[in-house]
C-alpha cells in the first residue's frame, strides 16, 4: 500500500478517490464469483474471502538491497517477496468494498469516509463510526489479510478472526 499517495493528496482529491473506490468497488463485486448473490453478511464473509484467496495470483519481486541484510535473511521477509497481479488487485478492491459494505449494512452507526489525516491511513477510503474513533481502512486490511493467507496456507481462520476483532469495535 502506497501511503505517500494519500498523504500528498488534497482533501478534495481524497473525496474523489473515495467516490471512485465506491463506484469501482461496486462494479468489481461481480468478479467475486457469487453470480450477483451477495447478502452482505459478516457471518458469510470469511467463506467468500477463502474462495477469492485461492484465485489470487502473484509475481515474484526482487529483494530490496536497501533493507539490512539481517532482515533480508529472515523467512518472513523472503515469504513477502511478491506483488499481486493486476487481476488480483482488482479482486481485492471488490473485496475491500464488500468488507466495508458488510459492516455498514450490519451496523447503522458506520459509514464510508476518508481517513483522518492524523492517522497513517489518512485520506484513504475507510469505514468510520467505530468505538474510540477507530477507522477501518478496507483496502489496507484486505491486502494484509490476503497476504497473510497466501503466506500461511494452513491458517484458515484469518478472515473470521478479522471480522470478530472489528465487530468488537462496531456495536
Image: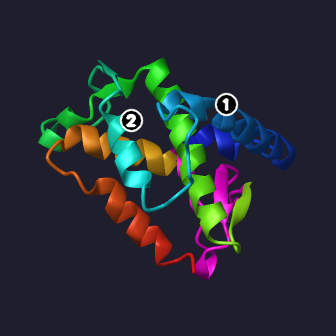
Q: Position of residue 120 (x, y in %)?
A: 57, 57
What residue sits 37% from the left and 53% below the top? 46
Q: Which residue is mark 2?
A: 52
Mark 2 or mark 1, which has the lower sequence index? 1
What residue sits 47% from the left and 69% below the top? 166
SS at badge 2: helix
Whether residue 142 sits left or right of residue 20 in the image: it is left
SS at badge 1: helix
Q: Which mark is residue 27?
A: 1
What residue sits 48% from the left and 61% below the top? 42
Main SS category, magenta section: loop
Magenta stretch bounds: 114-139
- Is 94 one of the magenta-colored residues? no
What residue sits 72% from the left and 63% below the top? 111
- Is 122 one of the magenta-colored residues? yes
Quadrant housing the C terminus? bottom right
For the residue carrying disc 1, how many other residues have a C-alpha within 10 Å: few (<14), some (14-19), or many (20+)? few
Viewer-closest of 101 and 153: 101
Residue 154 in view here:
yes
Q: Position of residue 62 (x, y in %)?
A: 28, 20
Q: Which mark is residue 35?
A: none
Amino acid at each position: 500500500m502506497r501511503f505517500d499517495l494519500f498523504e500528498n493528496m488534497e482533501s478534495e482529491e481524497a473525496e474523489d478517490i473515495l467516490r471512485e473506490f465506491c463506484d469501482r468497488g461496486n462494479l468489481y463485486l461481480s468478479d467475486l464469483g457469487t453470480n450477483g448473490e451477495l447478502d452482505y453478511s459478516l457471518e458469510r464473509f470469511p467463506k467468500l474471502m477463502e474462495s477469492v484467496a485461492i484465485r489470487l495470483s502473484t509475481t515474484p519481486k526482487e529483494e530490496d538491497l536497501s533493507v539490512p541484510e539481517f532482515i533480508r535473511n529472515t523467512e518472513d521477509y523472503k515469504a513477502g517477496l511478491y506483488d499481486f497481479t493486476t487481476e488480483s488487485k482488482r479482486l481485492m478492491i471488490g473485496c475491500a468494498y464488500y468488507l466495508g459494505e458488510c459492516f455498514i449494512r450490519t451496523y447503522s452507526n458506520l459509514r464510508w469516509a476518508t481517513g483522518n489525516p492524523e492517522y497513517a491511513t489518512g485520506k484513504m477510503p475507510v469505514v468510520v463510526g467505530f468505538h474510540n474513533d477507530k477507522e477501518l481502512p478496507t483496502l489496507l486490511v484486505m491486502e494484509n489479510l490476503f497476504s497473510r493467507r497466501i503466506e500461511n496456507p494452513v491458517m484458515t481462520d484469518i478472515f473470521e478472526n478479522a471480522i470478530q476483532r472489528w465487530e468488537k469495535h462496531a456495536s
